[in-house]
Image (cartoon, rainbow, N blue to C red):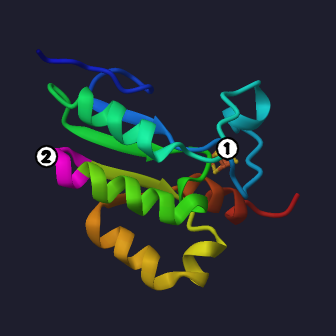
């Protein structure tokens, strides 16, 4: 079976995991903050891993996003390790590199070594806007 099921455009086979609604940024365009979102705070690692593993057939990737998934760095590493051990899926993480990634730099670098990541540029682009 060939599924196309990512949350953005449905053109690639990605399992998009809303890992947490928590975020330390305040982007004006944020869906999680502007609307009544899913209000997921602490991720349920057991449930996330089981759901991914049980539905891995026909999928290519898993994208962990938020919110800011790295706010739960240890839970994220746990999740990535378990999914890697049980599937052949490619794993991606979006992040704007919150403070915990500097405080626990070795753990963040370990996370980067076991999955691919997208650096969330939009927060930084906002910072680069000229002062009004
Ligand atoms: S980084 Fe993402 S989740 Fe966080 S406030 Fe900005 S748009 Fe929302």
Stretch in magenta: 84-90
Res. 48 in view: yes
Magenta region includes residue 31 = no
Residue sitting nearer the eye, 105 or 76: 76
Q: Residue at x 19, y 36 (%)?
A: 60
Q: Which residue is under mark 1?
A: 41
Q: In the image, residue 30 lies at what x, y percent? A: 70, 38
Q: Residue at x 65, y 74 (%)?
A: 99
Q: In the image, residue 2 lies at what x, y percent? A: 14, 17
Q: Quadrant of the N terminus?
A: top left
Q: Say the numbered circle drawn on residue 118.
A: none
- Give the answer, above or below, for where 74 lies relative to 35: below
Q: Quadrant of the C terminus?
A: bottom right
Left or right placement of residue 65 versus residue 32 in this view: left
- Distance CA(mark 2)–CA(mark 1): 28 Å
- Label 2 element class: loop
- Label 1 element class: loop
Q: Residue at x 76, y 37 (%)?
A: 33
| Rendering quarter of residue 52 | top left
- Residue at the extreme front of the image, as rendered: 46
Q: Residue at x 35, y 76 (%)?
A: 110
């Amino acid at each position: 079976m060939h599924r196309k099921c990512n949350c953005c455009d449905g053109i690639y086979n990605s399992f998009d995991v809303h890992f947490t609604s928590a975020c330390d940024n305040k982007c004006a365009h944020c869906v999680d903050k502007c609307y009544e979102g899913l209000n997921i705070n602490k991720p349920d690692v057991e449930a996330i891993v089981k759901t991914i593993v049980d539905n891995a057939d026909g999928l290519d990737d898993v994208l962990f996003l938020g919110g800011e998934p790295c706010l739960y760095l240890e839970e994220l590493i746990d999740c990535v390790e378990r999914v890697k051990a049980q599937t052949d899926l490619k794993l991606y993480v979006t992040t704007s590199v919150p403070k915990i990634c500097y405080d626990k730099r070795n753990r963040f670098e370990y996370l980067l070594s076991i999955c691919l990541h997208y650096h969330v540029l939009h927060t930084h682009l906002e910072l680069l806007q000229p002062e009004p």
